[in-house]
Image (tube, rainbow, N blue to C red):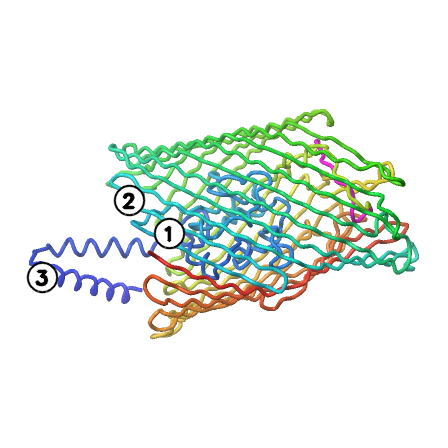
Amino acid sequence: MPIRLTRIAAAVFSVGVASAAMADVEQPKQQEIVKVEIKSSAAKYDPRRDDTASKTVVSAEEIQKYGDTSINDVLKRLPGITVGGAAGRGGGEIRMRGLGAGYTQILINGERAPAGFAIDSLSPDVIERIEVLRAASAEFSTQSIAGTINIVLKKAIKSAQREAKFSQAKSSGASSSSASLQMSDKHGASSYSLGANAWRFRYDRATPTSEIGADAAGVPNLGRDITSQDAGHGDGINLSPRINWMLDNGDTLTSQSFVNWNSFASDGRSRTDVRFGAWPEYDRIDSSYSSHSGFGRTDLNWVHKLEAGARLELKAAVSANRNTTDSQQLGGNRGAPATLYRTVHSASSEQGFSSQGKYSTPFTFGTPASAEAAVEHALSLGWDAGVTGRDDRRVQRDADLPGSVPMNSDEGFNARVTRLALYGQDEWNITPNWSIYTGVRWEGLDTRADGGSIDAVQNRSSVLSPLMQTLLKLPNKKDQIRLALTRTYKAPSAAALIPRRFTSTNNSPTEPDRRGNPDLKPELALGLDASFEHYWGEGGLLSASASVRRIGNYTRQGLFYEAGRWVANAINDGLAVTRGIELEAKLPASVLMDNAPKLDLRASVSRNWSRVDTVPGPDNRLDQQVPLSATLGIDYKAPGGQLSTGGNVSFRNGGLARISGTQGGYTSVRRDLDVYALWQLDPQNKLRLAVSNLLAQDYTSASIYTDANGALNRTTVNNGEAQFRLTVETRF
């Protein structure tokens, strides 16, 4: 490193001297040296290496490398992060430490996304960076038992930037097209940026499902084969405008907005072939579904600089969200006339207001006479408050057909969620090689709902979260140790608290009705994280980390038989413990040999274990936790920089997981292979080719019910599809 920086400094210094001579302007050498030092210092800063509070930052260049159109495809390649479901199907749950079901907190610009907003509809083109926090910090909500993924929308302003992208993708059962536009410019004391993305997709797929049952003696008594054909199409658009003003007194004022709109429609048909055993209530079901959703948010942020490096940040935001869905089902049995014609209309709207404030100041203990004993602090105090109102209505109507038993309902409610958080945090450098971060955050939530068809609901909870992280850099300047102690939690969502019932068409233990539980309490977790990191060269990294979480008030899905129907709802049930280890390596070829090609290797492995005390083993792990995941990637840039190429393999283990004494689930292993190639045609134009899910492996999932009377296993296979995507990028 010293040799390389010296050469860089000498080169920059020589260019500066030559430029000054050509302009016939005398420049003091001291000024040129100062400029070089500033650039070197900025280039050396690495938030993952230097920040006391552990954080991994994924840049826009990494996010856009494969030309992905979904943020889920980006996240599945990151170390320690997995995405559930079948590859290319969308809607998979994002997980850290293998945990989903709300244990992983997903933020957009530091705030939780509204209910019903699909993260995978967020285009990677509007994202500036992704921050991955494995241990909680007081500035963000501590609803992050597994960790936090903060998606930061683009805010960097580049003078007179114009960039457009056009993409077309195709697989065996789906196709999609998208376009994006990025613009930014500066005018005096103001600047602006605008990101716009639009997309359209369609698909036509067949999904086979089987149901196998056995009696108490294990003798098969049920065999059914179900074929579902589903075809649909959708459209969407994202807009993210931002305006910055630099005021005369040095303050800054920023307005940032985000608008998302989606529409979707599908038609499906399901046919059941009964090999032996009982027939379902409906062996043929024809259905249609449509939805429209819109979300908008705008905020105003003011930053005021105070004396001695202190600053005050104030932010206010308003948001609105609306979703409507309509569905129809026509069902019958054994060739007889239809006995089911059901229509369901749902509409929900949500309006919110939030306010955040933060005061931060640096200060030092010690005197100039004892500078070596001085301790530098960075103190922050702040609040985060908000109120959200929600109107929700669901109307179900069954036609009174011969032989039918109509199940009509008209369920609506009004809900109001009020939250308040207060926090303080301090980061101080005890020595040049040892720093400590401490914080405390109090969060309170109050949820109230009422409606004509449900009993009034009031659920109030509060959590105090003390936090501590420390970073110790060893004397060799290459190795460092991190340690974190945290108290985090997971609060039940408003939807999980509302005792509204959603009925299934063919009711069974593996397809139950669902209902909310107004008595749910937050899950509380005590956590310990430790890691060792070794850095060398420019970009070389070896990391090993271990973690443990002890979770109280664990929430699982309960299953009950009421009035002739199976009903599932969430319940608090005892204690759970989860543990994990993670290994990560980044190996640029330049750190291994001189005059190396521009070749970067990266790899990671995560192993997770968990145990739920009230669920009998084996396989009594948390929420079908992913036991093992791994990634392996390589990137290469050809001499001259006209061609860049690379690939990534991600692996996610599956297996059996027990949810309760009678319920279980199974997921198959998932392997994804993605490759890309990028050609720089000229300074303004690029061509990108990418293939995702090249292995095209099928994905299998199963729901299992077992009691003293026998067992029922429902297994679904999602066919794997490789997707080819071509993207044209141009600057103008």
For mark 2, what is the residue? Answer: 186
The mark found on residue 433 in the picture is 1
Q: For residue 522, what is the image quadrant?
A: top right
Instruction: Count neighbours of disc 2 (C-alpha within 10 A) and say few if under 14, some if 14 to 19, many if 20 or more.
Output: some
The C terminus lies in which quarter of the figure?
Answer: bottom left
Residue 231 in the image: x percent, y percent? 67, 55
For the residue pair 701 and 289, the one nearer the viewer reads as 289
Task: Identify the residue shown where x is 76% and y is 52%.
Answer: 664
Secondary structure of the residue carrying tag 3 is helix
Viewed as shown, does residue 216 lie left or right of 597?
Answer: right
Mark 3 vs mark 1: in front: 3
Instruction: Count neighbours of disc 1 (C-alpha within 10 A) and say few if under 14, some if 14 to 19, many if 20 or more.
Output: few
- Residue at mark 3 to residue at mark 1: CA–CA distance: 43 Å
Which of the two labelled residues, at mark 3 and mark 1, occupies the earlier sequence position? Answer: 3
Task: Identify the residue shown where x is 53% and y is 58%.
Answer: 79
Residue 52 in the image: x percent, y percent? 42, 48
* Magenta residue check for 492: no
Give the residues in magenta. 508-518
Q: For residue 346, what is the image quadrant?
A: top right
Viewed as shown, does residue 687 lie left or right of 221?
Answer: left
Q: Amino acid at mark 1?
A: Asn
* Magenta residue check for 516: yes
The mark found on residue 21 in the picture is 3
